[in-house]
Every structure is written in structure tokens, then in C-alpha cells.
Amino acid sequence: MAAPIPRSRRTPWRRALRRDWQLYSLAVLPLLFFLTFRYLPMLGNVIAFRRFQPGGSIFGEYWTGLRYFRLFFTDPTFWSVFTNTLVLGALTLLFCFPLPIVLALLLNEVRNRALKRFVQSVSYLPHFLSIVIVAAMVLQLLSVDGTVNQMVRAVGGEPVPFMQQAGWFRTIYVSSEVWQTVGWGTILYLAALTTVDGDLYEAARIDGANRWRQTWHVTLPGIRPTMVTLLILNIGTFMAVGFEKILLLYNPLTYPTADVISTYLYRVGIVSGNLSYAAAIGLFESVIGLTLVLSANAISRRTVGTSLW
């Protein structure tokens, strides 16, 4: 009778901690950061169900139940900003997710190292600019006396008040997001491209595949795990449309298309002081974001076999 195969023994966590305590100590500060600024503040969500008054208890004065949820569910202003959030989030995801992939594939085909580094440096640069600087540049370029309108006048046209017209805001916001983030987004894809096996390209060339076929059948499947991971992470921030940039760019004239949940929360919670109402809306937004992440992860796992967890 054959002897049973012994099960592999796992190293007890205490022994692993004593052995590699230097490595584990590097995780202390990140864990403290997330505990302090991500998990402990979740306790404050209780004021979405309680009446909070400044100067009183941090957990509210008395229980109100679902009163604040009913308020924003019946508030037409909330549904307007909710729609704007969905539209801006969808447009940002539609353009800012695939364009870094396209740029990385194009840079991967460049054989001149000097040109490749120059293009990378130019495309990375906007990421290091402060959002305040980017917003100021946009406002200056698109003002009535700005560079764009000076060019319009030069060809005989009438100046357009871009920043005072609600119809232009989404185009301006998404364009600035693309300019600021696409170059930086190529870093992970370029790193993933280096892991694709070169023998696969050789086999594809032997089979008669051109560059487009090699990209479609070798390159894209090779970086698919990275693409799926970043897509799920981007969907996780779908509802959190850039608060700072919108706050710096929008004005009452562009509220119909520019006002999103985060800016509405700022006006309701910080400016007006209705913190319980703002907490209820923020909790609703977080639940939707969590649902989107879990759904995207489940769909990815079932369709392409790759998921975040």
C-alpha cells in the first residue's frame, strides 16, 4: 500500500513575522494611513441616519431613519447632478481608458529611441502639473480674450464665451482630462508590453501575420490582465468625477451640465452646513460605486477569465 502523500506545511504566521519583520514593517505606515483616513471615517456615515448639528455629538443628536434619503430621492436637483455625473463619468471612461492603450501600442512600434523618449516626456509632463494650474490654463485659453478666441477672430469669426456656455463644458472637461492623464496612463501598458513573449511575434510572422494581426492576436491578449485590472479600477472611480477640476472650472451658468454629485455635496454639506443630508447622498454614491466594481469584476471573471480578485 502506497504511503499517503504528506500535505505541504505552511509556515506559521508568527514564524514568518519574526523571520521577515523588516519587510512587514514597511507596511505599517500604509496600513495606518488607510485605517486613519479610509476606515475610521466610515463611522461618520451614521449621521446619514441621524440629525447632526455642529458643536454636538459627532454621531448625531437623534435618530431620523431614512428621512434624508427620501429627501434626495424626491429632489429634482439631485437627479440632475446624478445624470451629469453619469454622463461625465461615461465620457471620461470612454476616452481616458482606451487612449493610453493606443498611445502605448504606437510608442511600442517606434524604433528611434530618442524620438520615443521625447514623445514619452512630452506626454507625461501634464500629469505633473497641479490641477489648479491646468484649470487656470484652460480658463486663460478659452476666455473671451484668450488664445482660442484670438484665433477665431483672426479667421473672421465671432468670439465664443466657452466657459459661460453649458453646452461646451463636457467637451472642455473631457479634453483637459485626456491631455492631462493619457500620457501617464501609458506607463503600466508599456511595462506590460515588455512581458509579452517575443517568440509569439516570431511565430505570428512565420504564419504570415502583418503588424496589425500581430497586435490584435499577440500584443492585446498579452496585456489583457493589465487592461482588465485598470478597467475595474477606473470603473471604481466612475462616480467620483474630478471634484477639484470641476469646482475650479464651473460657474452658475454651466450648472446644467457641469454640476456633479461631488460639487453638489460640497455646496450642500460645506457651504450650507447640512451635513446629514450630504452624508446620505455620499453614502448612496459609495454604494453605487461599490456595486459597479463588484459587477465589473464578476463580469470580467466570467467573460475573459481575469479579475481583480
Image (spheres, rainbow, N blue to C red):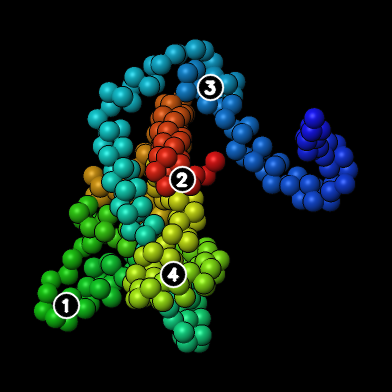
CA–CA distance in space, label 3 to label 4: 45 Å
Q: Position of residue 138 (x, y in %)?
A: 35, 65
Type of residue at label 4?
Ala
Tag 2 residue? 305
Secondary structure of the residue carrying numbered label 1: helix
Tag 1 residue? 153
Few, some or many residues within 10 Å of mark 4 (<14, 14–19, 20+): many
Tag 4 residue? 104
Q: Residue at x 30, y 33 (%)?
A: 78
Instruction: Give the mark toward the camera: 2 or 4.
Output: 2
Type of residue at label 3?
Val
Few, some or many residues within 10 Å of mark 2 (<14, 14–19, 20+): few
Which callout, 2 or 4, points at the residue further toward the start of the chain? 4
**Count of marks, rendered view:** 4
Q: Are marks 3 and 4 in contact (CB under 8 Å)?
A: no
Q: Residue at x 11, y 79 (%)?
A: 156
